[in-house]
């Protein structure tokens, strides 16, 4: 994945983030959730202690923000089939049972925190709608599996 | 009376032509890039909300075919209702953007000295055409479902993409002054 980073330090931090962290995470949805978790809920600022020891806080923030936005864009524009694959991968990597995770995601919609700041409402609308559909697809498959094990 | 009847016939013919245009399937309009077995739509790296990629994603027939393969009527129903909402929202957003560009253009044209009447008329025609087509698109979604106006919306997107360029060109002599 490439980015449109403006500063050289941010570019280095971005490359480091991909090589050392994101490349080891399985699936884009997992990566998106991870990146969203590096953002402070109150200030909306991104932090990564490990990266900040090598690069400046501003560069790290820019790198994390860019990676987050890019992954969000990729998942929003990917096909529904691909999104279902990504969601299934996320469920698989989770410690929760598929039933429990699907129930929580469908009711509480915790994935809303994965939306980057300053995203166009139309893009957000499409992302949320697609994720809702992907959850329903997995739920249907899960129900079928329980009915005919 | 005869003029009124002729106008109604012309309006109906225009709506029918646009509906037929939107329903006609062209393989190239669904162009997407296959990567490693799964299909990923092309992204532009620079602009975040790549307008045509979003249009392509919303009116994707591939997504509908995937849902149909799941063989669950409830899922199909949910897909139609979800995509209908997103598709209508897309048309509303596009329509607002067109209005904003038009408003901006009118505001700027009051200060311009070297306006070309021909070019202005062409632009006005394009604005009016786009506004009409957006309304037709909303109607087509209600009548034919969220994917029915796929080609029509691609057409709207292409023309809307050209609007700011047309506006800039129309003020080229102004900048030189």
Image (cartoon, coloured by chain):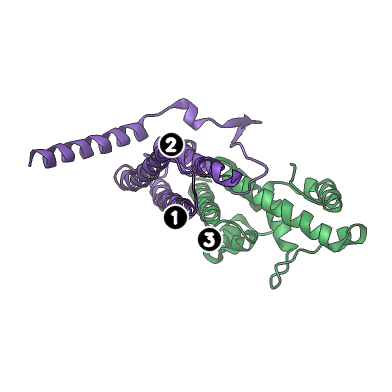
Q: Crowding at label 1, few (<14), some or many (≥20) Cα neighbours within 10 Å?
A: few
Q: Crowding at label 2, few (<14), some or many (≥20) Cα neighbours within 10 Å?
A: some
**Whole-percent x, y for residue B6 in the image:** 14, 36
Question: Do marks 1 and 3 share a chain?
Answer: no
Which residue lies at the image location 51% right of the left edge and 54% below the top edge? A122
Q: Is residue B12 left or right of residue A6?
A: left
Q: Colour of chain B?
A: purple
Q: Crowding at label 3, few (<14), some or many (≥20) Cα neighbours within 10 Å?
A: some
Q: Which numbered marker is on residue B155?
A: 2
Q: Is residue B52 left or right of residue B77?
A: right
Question: Can you name the residue that lies furthest to the right here?
Answer: A54
Q: Which numbered marker is on residue A106?
A: 3
Q: Could you tell which of marks 1 and 2 lies nearer the N-terminus?
A: 1
Which residue lies at the image location 72% right of the left edge and 62% below the top edge? A37
Q: Is residue A98 left or right of residue B138?
A: right
Is residue B20 visible to the viewer in this orientation of the structure? yes
Task: Verify CB contact (< 8 Å) between mark 1 and mark 2.
Answer: no
Is residue A84 visible to the viewer in this orientation of the structure? no
Of the residues tagged 3 and 2, which is closer to the observer?
2
Please report, as a chain letter, where disc 3 is located: A
Indicate the quadrant containing the N terminus of chain B: top left, top right, bottom left or bottom right: top left
């Amino acid at each position: 994945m490439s980015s449109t980073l403006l500063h050289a330090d941010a570019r280095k931090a971005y490359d480091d983030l991909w090589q050392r962290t994101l490349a080891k995470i399985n699936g884009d949805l997992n990566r998106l959730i991870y990146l969203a978790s590096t953002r402070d809920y109150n200030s909306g600022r991104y932090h990564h202690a490990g990266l900040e020891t090598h690069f400046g806080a501003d560069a790290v923030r820019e790198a994390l923000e860019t990676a987050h936005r890019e992954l969000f864009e990729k998942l929003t524009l990917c096909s529904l089939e691909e999104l279902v694959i990504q969601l299934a991968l996320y469920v698989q990597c989770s410690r929760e049972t598929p039933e429990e995770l699907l129930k929580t995601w469908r009711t509480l919609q915790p994935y809303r925190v994965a939306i980057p700041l300053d995203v166009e409402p139309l893009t957000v609308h499409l992302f949320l709608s697609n994720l809702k559909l992907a959850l329903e697809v997995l739920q249907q498959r899960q129900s079928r599996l329980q009915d005919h094990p | 009376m005869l003029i009124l009847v002729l106008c109604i016939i012309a309006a109906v013919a225009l709506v029918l032509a646009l509906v037929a245009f939107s329903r006609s399937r062209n393989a190239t309009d669904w162009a997407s890039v296959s990567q490693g077995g799964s299909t990923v739509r092309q992204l532009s790296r620079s602009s975040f909300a790549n307008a045509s990629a979003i249009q392509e994603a919303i009116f994707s027939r591939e997504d509908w075919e995937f849902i149909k393969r799941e063989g669950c009527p409830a899922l199909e129903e949910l897909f139609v209702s979800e995509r209908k909402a997103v598709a209508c929202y897309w048309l509303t957003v596009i329509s607002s953007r067109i209005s904003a560009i038009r408003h901006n253009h009118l505001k700027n044209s009051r200060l311009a000295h070297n306006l070309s009447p021909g070019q202005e008329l062409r632009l006005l025609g394009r604005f009016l055409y786009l506004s009409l087509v957006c309304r037709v698109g909303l109607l087509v979604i209600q009548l034919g479902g969220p994917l029915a106006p796929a080609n029509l919306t691609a057409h709207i997107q292409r023309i809307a993409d050209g609007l700011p360029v047309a506006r800039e060109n129309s003020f080229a002599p102004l900048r030189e002054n």
